[in-house]
């Protein structure tokens, strides 16, 4: 929790992506879930349909597909005229497609 609090304060993060009602950070103002039924608990639904204008924290499911889709979305969002920042937690899995996305000029490690 201390690390996430430090990240939240440093980047002024207000929204968490790919969370659930059981694991989202309570110190953030809002979160997005992959499940529509989580809206009953205050979640926003479908992070991919929203263009955020602040800095977000994202920790997608650790599947090749989910990691690639989330990072592709973040890169696409970074190409908009409006400023955008995503702080992401990712595993370093060799030979996965999403690893190639880390070479994009808008991705900073």
Image (cartoon, grey):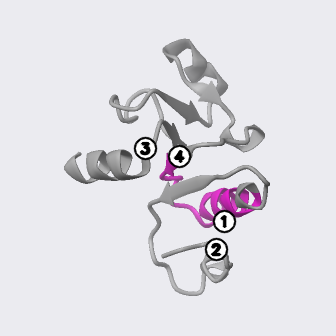
Of all residues, the one furthest to the left in this rendering is 2
Q: Label 2 vs label 4: CA separation?
A: 19 Å
Q: Label 2 vs label 3: CA separation?
A: 26 Å
The nearer-to-camera label among 3 and 4 is: 3
Q: Quadrant of residue 86?
A: bottom right
Q: Nearer the viewer, residue 82 or 58?
A: 82
For image coordinates 57% across by 34% down, the residue present is 33
Residue 23 vs 79, above or below: the answer is above
Q: Label 1 vs label 2: CA separation?
A: 5 Å
Residue 2 percent across, percent down from the top left? 20, 48
How many residues crowd around disc 2 within 10 Å: few (fewer than 14), some, or many (20 or more)? Answer: many
Q: Label 1 vs label 4: CA separation?
A: 17 Å
Q: Which numbered disc covers residue 37?
A: none
Q: Earlier in the sequence, mark 2 or mark 3?
A: 3
Instruction: Locate the N terminus and report the quarter of the image it occupies.
Output: top left
Residue 15 percent across, percent down from the top left? 51, 37
Find disc 4 in the rendering and name its residue.
Answer: 56
The answer to if 62 sits in the magenta stretch is yes
The stretch in magenta equals 56-76
Find disc 1 in the rendering and name its residue.
Answer: 68
Residue 93 percent across, percent down from the top left? 49, 79
Q: Earlier in the sequence, mark 1 or mark 4?
A: 4
The nearer-to-camera label among 2 and 3 is: 3
The answer to if 2 sits in the magenta stretch is no
The reply, left or right, for residue 34 in relation to residue 92 is right
| Callout 2 secondary element | helix
Q: Label 3 vs label 4: CA separation?
A: 9 Å
Find disc 2 in the rendering and name its residue.
Answer: 98
Find disc 3 in the rendering and name its residue.
Answer: 12
The nearer-to-camera label among 1 and 3 is: 3
The reply, left or right, for residue 76 in relation to residue 17 is right
């Amino acid at each position: 929790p201390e690390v996430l609090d430090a990240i939240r304060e440093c980047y002024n993060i207000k929204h968490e992506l790919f969370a659930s009602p059981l694991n989202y950070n309570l110190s953030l103002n809002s979160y997005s879930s992959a499940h529509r039924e989580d809206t009953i608990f205050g979640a926003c639904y479908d992070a991919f349909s929203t263009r955020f204008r602040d800095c977000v924290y994202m920790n997608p499911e650790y599947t090749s597909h989910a990691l690639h889709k989330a990072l592709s979305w973040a890169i696409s969002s970074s190409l908009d005229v409006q400023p955008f920042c995503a702080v992401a937690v990712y595993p370093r899995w060799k030979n996965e497609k999403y690893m190639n996305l880390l070479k994009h000029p808008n991705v900073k490690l």
